[in-house]
Image (cartoon, helix red, strand yellow):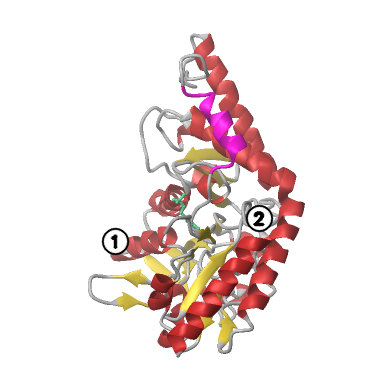
Amino acid sequence: MNSKAIYLDYAATTPVDPRVAHRMSTCLMFDGDFGNPASTSHQYGWQAAELVENARVQVADLINALPTEIVFTSGATESDNLAIKGAVFRTNHGHVVTSSYEHKAVLDTCTYLSDKGWDVTFVDPSRDGLVDPAAIENAITDETIIVSVMHVNNEIGTLNNVQEIGRMCRDRGVLFHVDAAQSVGKVEVDVKSQNIDLLSISAHKIYGPKGIGVLYIDRNAHSRIEAIIHGGGHERGMRSGTLPTHQIVGIGEAVRICKAQLPTERKRLLSLRKRLYSHLMQIPGVSLNGSEDERIPGLINVAFEGVDGETLLLALDGVAVSSGSACTSATVEPSYVLKAIGLEDQLAASSLRFTVGRFTTEEDVDLAATHVTDVVMKLRS
Ligand SMILES: *Cc1c(COP(=O)(O)O)cnc(C)c1O
């Protein structure tokens, strides 16, 4: 293949915005701000510390938090681990409530805790791909320490009512954690009005670099979370390790751009997604997985009846998309997310995820849709 495939996999990761890359590059070399933000005895350290604190304010501003409530981590996976393990290790016993279609960073953490003897309830989402707040409320017991429910599902793009779940958690005195890796920067997130105690963010889903993320910890929840990485006591003792100035400046700039462009980008991505969807809907036997209305602008997950998803992926060499299925050595397992929302194995195995993003054009969408249509028709005949 001569040219690169059309990239429609922005939910997996995004390219770094050039403005972000530029800012990061000024924090690496001798003539830049390379200092250790923890060095308090000279200018190099002060300068780096100031950049870190500026980024902290930018992240806090995006989600309506205080800068002191922002903890920098290596990404959303670490943030999820810190939130959930940090809460249960504090108490040494108790119950965790989550959903069965969380990202593996939450799911595997909860399974690990369950294997270690903690009590965990996995609540199934509904057929339209949403977690019913009432189902979470029913799962909460007097022993529950923490509830963890994702804001937007990374495979199907559906948007949960976290405000309502958060309100119930507050009423019961239970910590509420939200994995917001797929929602921050794309839809409004307000940790205060949405009653969120802990919130995970990842930079590389919002045009920032890989390897940096945030855990927001509400100031009233701070004493209920225990660190899982110990060392120099950085980040108010919550996460030790020398702060990576360039990465932190990167997430700060990424977040600044998202905040400034959110309304226009949301409109643009919604229009691109609808364009793609209406193209694909012309193919017979195509259906959307998850609610059509309660979703982020840029993502659709579509089932192509009678076509094997893996075969389709292989045949689609000009379009970069993904299926949620996991390949083990011998077999291809259909996506656990699609199974959790009640899709039959066969339909789950014939589903693909398409995500448009900041650098997607109408031409990309049209070309990709034509290509998908051709390949599906060919495979069916
Ligand atoms: C990408 C993603 C993660 C993992 O984030 P990393 O920064 O790559 O560790 C966690 N949760 C969701 C919902 C994601 O989409």
Query: Residue at image x 60%, y 28%?
Result: 53
Residue 281 sits above or below residue 252 on the image: below
Is the CB of the residue bearing disc 1 within 8 angstroms of ligand 1?
A: no
Q: Which residue is mark 2?
A: 186
| Residue type for callout 2 | Lys
Give x and y (percent) for residue 67: 63, 35
Give x and y (percent) for residue 13: 50, 53
Give x and y (percent) for residue 176: 56, 58
Quick check: 162 left or right of 44? right
* The furthest residue to the front: 2
**Foreground pick, 179 / 6:** 6
Q: Secondary structure at mark 1?
A: loop
* Spatial CA span between label 1 and label 2: 36 Å
| Residue type for callout 1 | Lys
The answer to whether residue 68 is magenta is no
* The N terminus sits in image quarter: bottom left
**Foreground pick, 291 / 24:** 24
Q: Which residue is mark 1?
A: 116
Pointers 1 and 2 in contact (C-beta within 8 Å):
no
Q: Secondary structure at mark 2?
A: loop
Say which quarter of the image contains residue 330: bottom left
Chain part drawn in magenta: 16-28
Query: Residue at image x 56%, y 17%?
Result: 47
Give x and y (percent) for residue 306: 45, 89
Query: Residue at image x 46%, y 67%?
Result: 322
Q: Which mark is residue 138?
A: none
Residue 196 in sight from this viewpoint: yes
Query: Residue at image x 53%, y 75%?
Result: 372
Q: Nearer the viewer, mark 1 or mark 2?
A: 2
Callout 1 crowding tier (Cα within 10 Å): few <14, some 14–19, many ≥20: few
Name the magenta segment's main secondary structure.
helix
Say which quarter of the image contains residue 193: bottom right
